[in-house]
Amino acid sequence: MSERSQRARGRLTGVGVGPGDPGLITRRALEVLEGADRVVAPVSEGAGPGRAETVVRTVLPDLHVTRLAFEMTREGSHVGAARALLPWLDAGEHVAFATLGDPHLYSTFPALATAVRTLGGDVDVDTVAGVTAFCALASVSGTVLLDGSESLSLVTALDGPEHVETALGEPGRAVVVYKGGRYVPEIAALLAARGRLEGAVLGERLGLPDEHVGPLSQASGPASYLATVIVPPAGRR
């Protein structure tokens, strides 16, 4: 039997820590973070602590968090981060990766886990669900997301409002927009043209001291990158 096969199998857990409010991290997430051999959190090259790390440090101030640097390009970013994790995982460690929101919703975690396995990491992968930004925004703003037989479209405006325009083609659907902060004026204009601006809400930096939540119609310009917009279904009383 090889030395590697005798070692404990590594485990990689994506832990959703919520949208930014430390009060919205789950008890399950706390248990996994405290029980892991190592906790890592993503950070941009050369930047300070990210929002996921900030949440973890707020609720578990004595926990050591290792920053996992991500480069600008998506492919290079995940491969480089995966290489950094491999020695710990190959040694049989349980590594918890803290991620904003939920690990399966526009998170870096699935691509990171895929990169680890592609590089030869023989690991167990699991996740801990987290509160999403749009659910937090609905709560703070008092917006009913869905009722009765209504449905929802979740889109990003990372590269522009085109996906938003497509989603608005079904008036009976609520629309949630992620990562469209710099296109807020264009999104607001699009909603106004479709008669959907009334009732739409904008939230950014949710749970942080400088949180902003209000009607999208009152937005004065671009918002931060992680801004969230909720557009209720058309025709709702």
Image (tube, rainbow, N blue to C red):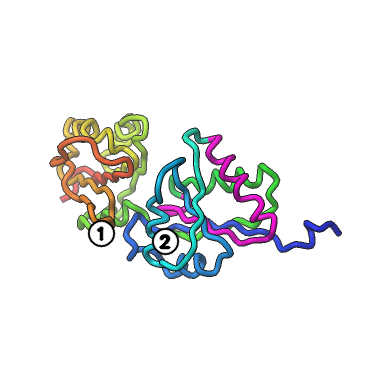
The image shows residue 135 at horizontal and vertical percentages of 32, 55
Q: Residues within 10 Å of mark 1 (few under 14, many from 20)?
A: few
Q: Quadrant of residue 235?
A: top left
In the image: residue 141, left or right of residue 81: left
Q: Amino acid at mark 2?
A: Val
Q: Amino acid at mark 1?
A: Ser
The image shows residue 233 at horizontal and vertical percentages of 24, 45
Which residue matches tag 1? Answer: 139
Q: Does the magenta segment cover residue 94?
A: yes
Q: Nearer the viewer, mark 2 or mark 1?
A: 2
- In the image, the segment drawn in magenta is 75-104
**Residue lying at 63% horizontally and 46% vertically, measured from the top left:** 116
Q: Quadrant of the N terminus?
A: bottom right
Q: Quadrant of residue 223?
A: top left
Q: Does the magenta segment cover residue 20?
A: no
Determine whether the residue tagged by mark 1 lies in a helix, strand or loop.
Answer: helix
The image shows residue 164 at horizontal and vertical percentages of 31, 35
> Which of the two discs, 2 and 1, labels the residue nearer the N terminus?
2
Q: CA distance from mark 2 to mark 1?
A: 22 Å
